[in-house]
Amino acid sequence: MSRAAVTEVKTERHPNMATDTQSRELTDGFHLVIDALKLNDIDTIFGLPGIPITDLTRMAQAEGMRVISFRHEQHAGNAAAAAGYLTQKPGICLTVSAPGFLNGLTALANATTNCFPMILISGSSEREVVDLQQGDYEEMDQLAIAKPLCKAAFRVLHAQDIGVGVARAIRSALSGRPGGVYLDLPAKLFAQTLDAVEGRNSLIKVVDPAPRQLPAPDSVQRALALLKGAKRPLIVLGKGASYAQADADIRALIEKTGIPYLPMSMAKGLLPDTHEQSASAARSYVLAEADVVMLVGARLNWLLSHGKGKTWGTPGAKQFIQIDIAPTEMDSNVPIAAPLVGDIGSCVAALLGGVGSGWAKPPAAWTGAINERKDKNLSKMAETLAKNPSPMNFHSALGVVREVIKARPDVMLVNEGANTLDFTRSIVDMYEPRKRLDVGTWGIMGIGMGFAVAAAVVTGKPVIAIEGDSAFGFSGMEVETICRYNLPICVVVFNNNGVYRGTDVNSSGTADVAPTVFVKGARYDKMMEAFGGVGVHATTPAELSKAIDEALASGKPTLINAVIDETAGTESGRITMLNPQTAAKK
Ligand SMILES: Cc1ncc(C[n+]2csc(CCOP(=O)(O)OP(=O)(O)O)c2C)c(N)n1
Ligand SMILES: [Mg+2]
């Protein structure tokens, strides 16, 4: 129990006590929240102080928790989400009432969409006043607003229920499909006192919060039979597969079966991208031509064209096996011939058991055709990367990052933007699991600095954040946070003067620039210098390479303003086709 427990002199007569005056230890809501988190091995809070949680941040720090204080709650929330993804423990984001809560809510919703476990804990105004809408300080019915945007939402009104509230939040975030949970703590709760022993006894250490969920044996057999009969099998790994931390078994399954695989963005590195069975460089070919596709922790959402359409070749010619912990994921877009419902570790282990040692590798006609395309595309890529145009473009700049990660595969890579995202994903190979953090299922901008901070804090490894100049702007003020905690983060801003490109023109003839264009020649490196970090202006791959190497060697907060050809990008990067096109002519 916390050191800061208060002592109260009790004067009323207690039936079991011999004397009228007894002193007893008291605890309070503040300390019960901290103790409940610590009891469950949660050691870090990402947040932003203010009424009513300022003392909670101070006390948590005094009680030995790491409290990382941000400049905007959205980034604290994103950090919590990334921490959850990397550790399989819910990341904690702590905010003030109404506006702070709302600022954190985008991150909570994004975490839920991405299946990252996090808990948004927000202080709130007094129930009596909020419910009668009497105009309290930062009045808002936060619980009701959070509910549709997360897995579960709870409110604790009494200090003796804090243990249950925190336990329910942890179990909800981690069990089944992980996601975001909201915990509402009204201001009054924090000051409530409780007998210290009673308080301690009210806390719950959650046992087995993410229990294994074994797949039904017949579902395993069904999947194996389908896989065995395939002529052109393919395995698709999603970020669920990365989250599962079943790295050795996933690799063994792929290598024992000899089946080509495709990693989704955040599954890159689960096996090294240079693995001979990686089909990344022949992506469109394998998606169109495969006859049996096994999805491992990957959903058939927009990122996989919903499992249908031109991307997937002849309609109806494909059969899917899907491993997912949520049974309702099955058939969400196309029929799933062999649903495998369970946790990824258990499902993959069960499949491995069934594969045994005598598994026949896929026909050489299939793997040969893939390799042919891979070789062609990889040598095309090598040719492009060998060029050194002036000004620097995405390829020549990313050729540098590619070499850095090859030499330092332990480095964490954060990535957002449009062209900056797409080119980084395809050019920079990853070699180790869970090293790549990016915009995920929503393609959301603004995760950059929050994810980078979490990556540094949670892993202790150096972080490189490859950021479009627009993407960086969403969380740019957090460079102060990076400097304040002296984190080994190297931010590289791919500065092409705008969203997608810097070349758009305003066709109206007024003085305003086009909506996608920024200040030309901006010096983002100066932002880092303003807070004591290292700022570098890089216009060539050689300068960029030197600056990244120095940042990794020194571990100092660094921001490199990498000047990229403003004409080099395309509208929305690789997803131009998602922009609505009107047939109407003006
Ligand atoms: C929260 C949010 N707002 C807006 C968008 C739309 N959007 C997609 S990419 C992008 C920025 C792209 O520009 P930049 O980061 O500079 O990358 P570039 O293509 O120039 O390399 C924007 C604003 C989004 N995805 N998320
Ligand atoms: Mg840009």
Image (spheres, rainbow, N blue to C red):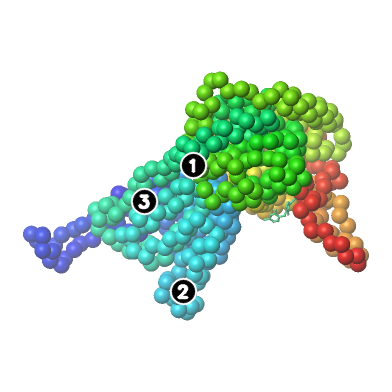
Q: Residues within 10 Å of mark 3 (few under 14, many from 20)?
A: many
How many discs appear? 3
Q: Is residue 473 above or below residue 466?
A: below
Q: Going from the N terminus, do you reach mark 2 or mark 1 first?
A: 2
**Disc 1: which residue:** 342
Position of residue 413 measured from the top left corner of the image (x, y, whole percent) = 64, 38
Mark 1 nearby-residue class (10 Å; few <14, some 14–19, many ≥20):
many
Q: Is residue 371 visible?
A: no
Q: Secondary structure at mark 1?
A: loop
Is residue 360 toward the left or the right of residue 286 in the image?
A: left
Spatial CA distance of label 3 from label 2 is 27 Å
Vertical position of residue 392 compared to residue 271: above or below: below
- Check disc 2 and report the residue beneath it: 130
Who's the residue at 36% across and 44% down the image? 207
Can residue 324 be seen here? The reply is: yes
Q: Vertically, is 69 above or below 311?
A: below
Marks 3 and 2, the one that precedes in the sequence:
3
Give, as a three-letter code, the residue at label 2.
Val
Question: Label 1 sits on what residue type?
Answer: Gly
Q: Residue type at mark 3?
A: Ala
Q: Are marks 3 and 1 in contact (CB under 8 Å)?
A: no
